[in-house]
Structure formats: structure tokens, C-alpha cells
Amino acid sequence: MGRLVIVSNRAPSIDGTGDSGGLVVALKDALAKDGGLWIGGAPEQTDTPASSLVFHHRPDFDIGLFELEPQLYRDYYFGYSNSLLWPALHGRVDLIEVQPRYAAAYSEVSRRLARMISDTVRSDDVIWVHDYQLIPLAHELRVLGCRNRIGFFLHIPVPGLETFKAIPEWRDLAAWLAEYDLIGVQTQRDLAHLINIFRHTLRGELRSNGNMGINGREVVLGCFPISINVEGFRRLAEEGSIGTPPPPLPRLIGVDRLDYSKGLPQRLAGYETFLSQYARFRSKVSLLQIAPPTRDDVEAYRDIREELELRAGHINGLYGTVDWTPVQYIHRALPRDELAVLFRLSRVGLVTPLFDGMNLVAKEYVAAQDETDPGVLILSQFAGAAEEMPQALIVNPHDPQDMAEAIKTALEMPRAERIARHEALYDYLANHDVEYWSSSFLKRLLAVETIDLHWTSRYSAYQPGVKAS
Ligand code: ADP
Ligand code: F6P
């Protein structure tokens, strides 16, 4: 095998200082092993973008940045990616915004990127594309004659067919996905939806090995739940908490980007129900919600911020006293080592999205706990992580009563039960960490038969935008 070439919308930092993000931590070891290349978007846009990748060398791997003009970037990232694909794939078709220029920008970015990549990849390189921002990339690379193995991993959910059809370009998206050699998704739920989409859109046929026959070739499908560096995060929490005093009251913690998929107003509604029904806990617990801003240029994100602040203010106004603030809210990102300690010193972790590809915070909370006196994870049934973490308290985030009961159960849970649940969760995670995730995906990708000989006729036959029956 040649190099591993990772492609994602966000690039890792050039100097290695921003390596705390899940994806970078996940993949940098795999890249460093055989000397790889990570291609990602430049952090700043420019009116005169370079027509080729801008390379930087790190000791562990190389980085190739692609530059975009501000307007193209806005239409591709805030527009198609985050005002259409993100809400649709998270089941929020009420929030989608359809604009022809968004679709054009989305295809244009993959087209340009494919040109830059084909100038730089070697014939034995293996290409691994990440996430919904770059779905058309394999198609564009094939059009340019690229015959490398190309894998794709979708970090966010695959919705049901009818929801998927709310995206005007749903047929194109399905066809673009089918150009990859291997498609990885987070959960069995996503895999079932993807199979159904391929069946209905491209007359895909499910084979006995779990792959799909589409247009005369086999597309390999797999479920690869992403994870974290479990032992590393545990150590960060353990070492950081030495000498740190515990909070004055048992603490519930939530840590999420301020995204409408994370169910933050619903979480506060559950907490409010808890305080209203179980008055004896008033002044005896606190909720810390850390929710940094994200994608601020999209209206739905501004709306969710207002709603959250309103609800937090409402609860504090209703139940707060001179000595007690029921909800503490921090609207910014915190360093990873601080988060790890906060997780460890919190009695309850609240991870209650309305829909989520995986949710790494759930895994971080478990990894950070003191095994001799662990906290309790309350996890939404709609987080991808729920498939792997049944020993958490699983809740329906739309039901404030269910959340209130779970909070009470968690706070009253005897130590022996907390230890038993934590042990089962931790043991599973220790055996399914991020290294396991990336190596299983790559092993599968390397096992894919090389591209069939008829690829040229297939790719010249397919025209994006032309609707299949
Ligand atoms: P998503 O990818 O949708 O943001 P995940 O839960 O899978 O959701 O991953 C979020 C990552 O971002 C986690 O590693 C988490 O620790 C980190 N993160 C979330 N909120 C903050 C914050 N306030 N400060 C620092 N890191 C954060
Ligand atoms: O996990 C889904 C995801 O979209 C990642 O692709 C991305 O890195 C993360 O959420 C944060 O989103 P963004 O890169 O748009 O800030």
C-alpha cells in the first residue's frame, strides 16, 4: 500500500497544537504509521485561492490545504452542508433551506478538490474521505480517471428514505455515494437506512455478504462506530483531577456544540420537571451546561442559542436563590484537559441529543470516571452511542418526565450499581477505542477488490443532475 490520504472539510492544525478534536486524534496515528497526507479546507478563505493544494509538513504527516473564495465557501459550508444536508440527515426537514446556488457550490468544491487531489495522489495511495460535506468527491475523482481505492465514512446519521427525499438532489447523493468502494456508517440503524435508500434509488441488491450490488459492481458497506482514545482520556481526567476539589454540590454536566440536534432545550425541560417534582433536590444539585457557539451564520443556530438562554434564565428565575444557581451555562469551548476533569467530578453526564451520528461526549464521560466511585451516564435513545452503551440510563429526550425520572435514579443510584454499570461500559470502550475504529475501517478498505475493469464506461455514462428512474 502507498500512503493513506485522508480528506475532510476541516484540516488539522499545521503545528499540531489543535490536535484535540476527535477526528484528528482518531486518525493521526494511522497517518503517522506509514507517512500519510491529510487534505482539508484552509482555515481562512481568500479572494484569490490557489489552484492547487498548499502543502505543510508536520513531523507525523503532511497537510495539504485547499483554499476557497468567501462566497463559494459560504454557499458550500453554511449553505448546502449545514442549511440543507445537516438538518435533513438529522431528521429536521422543517429547518432545511433550499437554494440552487448552494447545490452548485457543493458540487463545485468537490470538483475542484478532485482536480487538486488527482494532481498529487500516487497510484497505490488509499483515499479515505470523511463526512457529508464531501459526498461527491469519489465521483469527481473517477471522472478524472482516478482508480485508487476510495473509502467514505459518514459521521452523521442516515435518515429514513422519505426524509432523505426532502433533499432535492437525493438521487445524485445516492449515486455519488455508490461511487465509493467502501461506505462506513456509525450504527446498524444507519446501515439499514442506507440499504433502503440504495434499493429504492439505484435498484441496489443486497448480497449475502452484506454488500450491495449497484450498477454491475459491488459496493462494500459496513458499520464502524467511531470512538475515542479511551485510555488517554482516562489518564487526562485522572491526572488532572489530582488536587482539584470536588464541586460543592453533586453536579450534572452537559457538553455539546450549541446545535439543535443536541436537544438542549429538551434537556432543560427535563431538568425543570425534575426540580418541580422532586423538591427535595432543590439547592442540592446543580447543572453545568457547556455549549460553545457553532455555525453562527446559519439562522437555526442563532435561534437555538436564544431558546437555550431563555430556558436557562427561566429555571434560574423560578428556582434560584441567593445561594444557589440551578443552571450554570458557559457559551464557549474549554480546553480538553479541563473538560476531562469536569466530567470526572460530575455525578451525572447528560447526553440527550434528538438525533446524533455517534456522540463522543458519551464515551468521554465514561472514560473520565473514577472506577471506584463513578458517575452515571444518561443517554438518549437517539444517540448512535446508545447501540453500544446499553448500561447507561437510556431516555427519550422528548419526554421531560422520562428525563426527570432518570436524573433522580442516577442521583440515588447505589455505588455498587454505579460501579457495575461503569465497569461494563468501560470494558467495552477499552476494546473498541478509536484505534480499533480506524484500523477496522482501513482493513476493510484494503480488502476491497480493486476497481472493476468497466469503470470508465460506468463513469462516463453517469451524469450528475440527470434523474434516474
Ligand atoms: P459533534 O461531532 O456533533 O460535535 P461529538 O459529541 O461526537 O459531537 O463530538 C464533540 C467533540 O467536541 C467532543 O470531543 C467534545 O469533547 C468536544 N466538545 C464539545 N463541546 C466542547 C466544549 N465546550 N469545549 C471543548 N470541547 C468540546
Ligand atoms: O461530527 C460531525 C461533524 O460535522 C464533523 O464532521 C465536524 O468536524 C464536527 O461535526 C463539527 O462541525 P464543524 O466542522 O462544522 O464545526
Image (cartoon, rainbow, N blue to C red):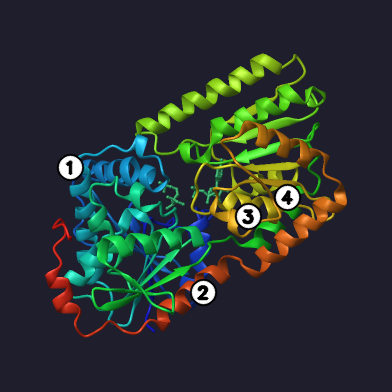
For label 2, the SS is helix
Label 3 crowd bin: few (<14), some (14–19), many (20+), radius 10 Å = many
* Disc 1 within 8 angstroms of ligand 2 (CB): no
Mark 4 to mark 2 CA distance (whole Å): 31 Å
Please state which of residues 97 and 334 is positioned toward the viewer in this rendering. Answer: 97
Mark 3 residue element = helix
Helix, strand or loop at label 1? It is helix
Q: Of residues 50 and 311, which is closer to you in this image?
A: 311
Identify the amino acid type marked 3: Lys
Q: Quadrant of the C terminus?
A: bottom left
Which residue type carries mark 4?
Gly
Q: Which mark is residue 100?
A: 1
Judging depth in this view, the residue of 156 and 141 nearest the camera is: 156
* Labels 4 and 1: the sequence-earlier one: 1
Q: Earlier in the sequence, mark 1 or mark 2?
A: 1
Q: CA distance from mark 4 to mark 3?
A: 18 Å
In the shown orientation, is residue 405 left or right of residue 307?
A: right
Give the Cα distance between marks 3 and 1. 39 Å
Reply above or below: 78 against 24.
Answer: above
Type of the residue with mark 1: Pro
Q: Earlier in the sequence, mark 4 or mark 2?
A: 4
Q: Earlier in the sequence, mark 4 or mark 3?
A: 4
Estimate the spatial distance between the alpha carbons at disc 1 and disc 2, rounded to whole Å: 38 Å
Q: Which residue is mark 2?
A: 440
- From the image, tell me which residue sits under label 4: 240
Please say if 146 is above or below 412: below
Q: Is residue 327 visible?
A: no
In percent of width and height, residue 412 lies at: 83, 39
Q: Residue at x 41, y 77 (%)?
A: 445
